Image (spheres, rainbow, N blue to C red):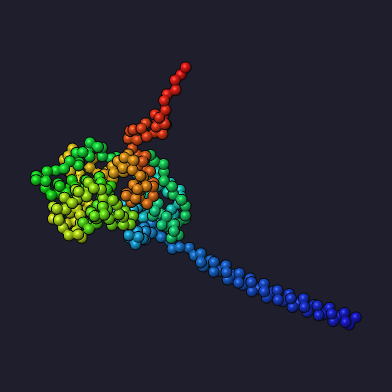
Amino acid sequence: MCSNWHTIKYHFRVIKCCIEKLYQVASINWNGFCSFIVMKIKMQKEKEDKTVKEAFQEFIKYCKVKSLSESTISYYKTSYSYFVDFYGADKSTKGITRALVNDFILYLKGRDMNNTSVNSRLRRVRAMLYYFMRLGYMEEFKIEMIKAEKKLKKTYSDSELELLLEKPDKKECSFAQYRNWVIVNYLVGTGNRLKTLVNVKIEDIDFDSGYITLKKTKNKKQQVIPLSKQLAKILVEYLEYREGELEDYLFCNIYGKKLKESTLKSAIRKYNLRRGVDKTSIHLFRHTFAKKWILAGGDVFRLQKILGHSTMDVVKEYVNMFGDDLKKEFDKFNPLDQVADNHDPIQMK
């Protein structure tokens, strides 16, 4: 009997010891769990409340750090002004919701803007708001463009190009008139953007290899494009009059200094009007280059590289923009017509 009692006491002490151990472990785990919860709360501390004006100033600083062009930043500022006119500059970014953005779209439409113009403003406001979202200044949600019909891009017709490309009499014209003629040839022969053109230097033209190096492009990437034989011939003659050092800009004002974009826009506008062409946009030469390249059977992938597009999206727009021009010689290249022309007609009994 005594032996059994000692055995019971022993087992009781063992069970008591186990219970105490379990309590200690549970206590430690509970305290650790509480500490973890406190840490998570601290880590999830809400971002500082920002006004739209304060957040936009940070966005502009970010744009400058990313080396975006002044014109791009100017477009952002213009679109921002539309947004703050609607919502307010001193209001919190936290009040910007999906419903508010939809109301902003209706606000733009109420200003007699077509859908393309609305998308133009909305696209820049979206970039700004997405930046706010990444910094945690507002809730995250997707902002989609509205449906808009894309208009066919205008181009210079063949008859207009004949007027613009007619060479002036060098004995009677001024240097500016001659230079403008050379620039029009350059634009038709390269499809370069205005900003790219005014930053080309004499040293960037490699007549031996037949290439032009473009150092100032929209996507900030240096680009090398082919130099056509006709354009090379024109530039060689032009440089006999322009002269200058290798590091000088290819196209200059009458004093040999770099051309400003605004000056060139005005010069080409006057040049075109004097030759009886009402279209005066420099960018239309880029559309014209793309159009004539494609209609001549040029490879669209090479066109993408020459124009400096990172994707095929814009090139696809060029392919779709010609309307009636795509009908020209359609039967000649259509596979069905090609096959049918190679067979004698079947005689009906």
Residue at the limit of the structure toward the left, as seen here: 171
Q: Residue at x 41, y 34 (%)?
A: 335
* Towards the viewer: 70 or 138: 70
The tally of labels here is 0
Instruction: Please state the horizontal and vertical placement of residue 148, each as a whole percent of the image.
Output: 39, 41
Vertically, is 339 above or below 111?
above
Along the line of sight, the residue nearer the viewer: 67 or 286: 286
Q: In which quadrant is the N terminus drawn?
A: bottom right
**Image position of 110 (left or right of 274):** right
Q: Nearer the viewer, residue 256 or 169?
A: 169
Q: Residue at x 53, y 66 (%)?
A: 41
For the view shown, which residue lies furthest in the right direction?
1
Q: Quadrant of residue 202?
A: bottom left
Residue 259's x, y, as percent?
Answer: 19, 54
Direction from residue 215 to residue 52 in the image, left or right? right
Residue ID at (20%, 44%): 269
> Residue, x 33% and y 53% (percent of image)?
76
Q: In terms of depth relative to the viewer, which is nearer, 313 or 9?
A: 313
- Whole-percent x, y for residue 82 in the image: 34, 49
Which quadrant holds residue 275? top left
The answer to whether residue 32 of the structure is visible from this angle is: yes
Residue 26 located left or right of residue 146: right
Above or below: residue 329 compared with residue 206: above
| Whole-percent x, y for residue 243 in the image | 14, 56
The answer to whether residue 195 of the structure is visible from this angle is no
